[in-house]
Image (tube, coloured by chain):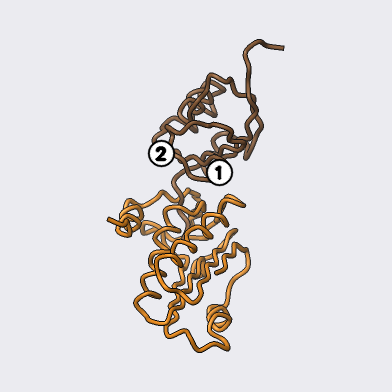
Amino acid sequence: MSNASTSTVQLRYFAWVREKIGVADEIRSVPDSIITVADLIDWLKTQGAEYQAAFANPGIIRTAIDQKHVTNDVALGDGKEVAFFPPVTGG
Amino acid sequence: MSVRVQNEDFDIAAEMKAITDRRSDIGACVSFTGLVRGEADGKALLDMSLEHYPGMTEAELQRIEAEANERWPLNASRIIHRIGKLEPGAQIVLVITASPHRQAAFEAAQFIMDFLKSDAPFWKKETLASGEAEWVSCREGDATAKNRWQKS
């Protein structure tokens, strides 16, 4: 057991973010020092080349917490599910 | 109000009839249909694949539809969006709005499409006739189209 406390979060990826990372979803233990969406992205970028590639340009990535759009300065709070995806292109 | 995300095609006339049938309070019924264009940046398109975020997609569409119903006096509305593989000419999306008068129906349909384009979590991947496949990038104009509805 590590002393550093962590929380578990369900991560989901869509479109080319999913393709670059190589999985559609995963459950991760995230250090509690991570407060905002931007912190989480910075941390994910340390998790391997595929994450670095997916988040190379974080400004273009869109995020949803518990299936609601948020901006990257928002705190993760009690969010259970965090999704990352490119700007949407439906319609 | 109703929202559907489905693989199957839809029948515009049947959907409109379902809304207007057996009632006489509707004076105007507007429908918008989005179709797959056969070319992308001047290159021939083989097909298009539509991915979405199950759960969030339906929630976003319901939120957009509810907001349209709040802003305009609508008798009824419907949003249908397809997912999966679609060929050129195929129908992608249907929006129907019904109101006692045309102005509200026209405006609400445009509002729904503008918000759907920038908020509903769908992503298109195009496969060209050459075999090349690429994710569609968002258009600057979509955000502008949405912003014009901002209340001052």
Q: Nearer the viewer, residue A9 or B85?
A: A9
Q: Which residue is mark 2?
A: A60
Q: Which residue is mark 1?
A: A14
Using the image, tell me which numbered label, if any, was put on residue A39.
none
The structure residue drawn at horizontal position 63% and vertical position 68%, both measured from the top left corner, is B8
Q: Amino acid at mark 2?
A: Ile
Which quarter of the figure is the N terminus of chain A placed in?
top right
Quadrant of residue B28 within the rendered picture: bottom left
Quadrant of residue B30 within the rendered picture: bottom left
The structure residue drawn at horizontal position 55% and vertical position 67%, both measured from the top left corner, is B80
**Please, which chain is the residue tagged with disc 1 on?**
A
Q: Amino acid at mark 1?
A: Phe
Q: Nearer the viewer, residue B104 or B82?
A: B104
Picture coordinates of residue A42, whole percent (x, y): 48, 24
Picture coordinates of residue A40, whole percent (x, y): 51, 27
Quadrant of residue B49 within the rendered picture: bottom right
- Say which label, 1 or 2, has the lower sequence index: 1
Query: Disc 1 versus disc 2: distance between alpha carbons?
Result: 13 Å
The structure residue drawn at horizontal position 55% and vertical position 80%, both measured from the top left corner, is B19
* Figure colour of chain B: orange
* Figure colour of chain A: brown
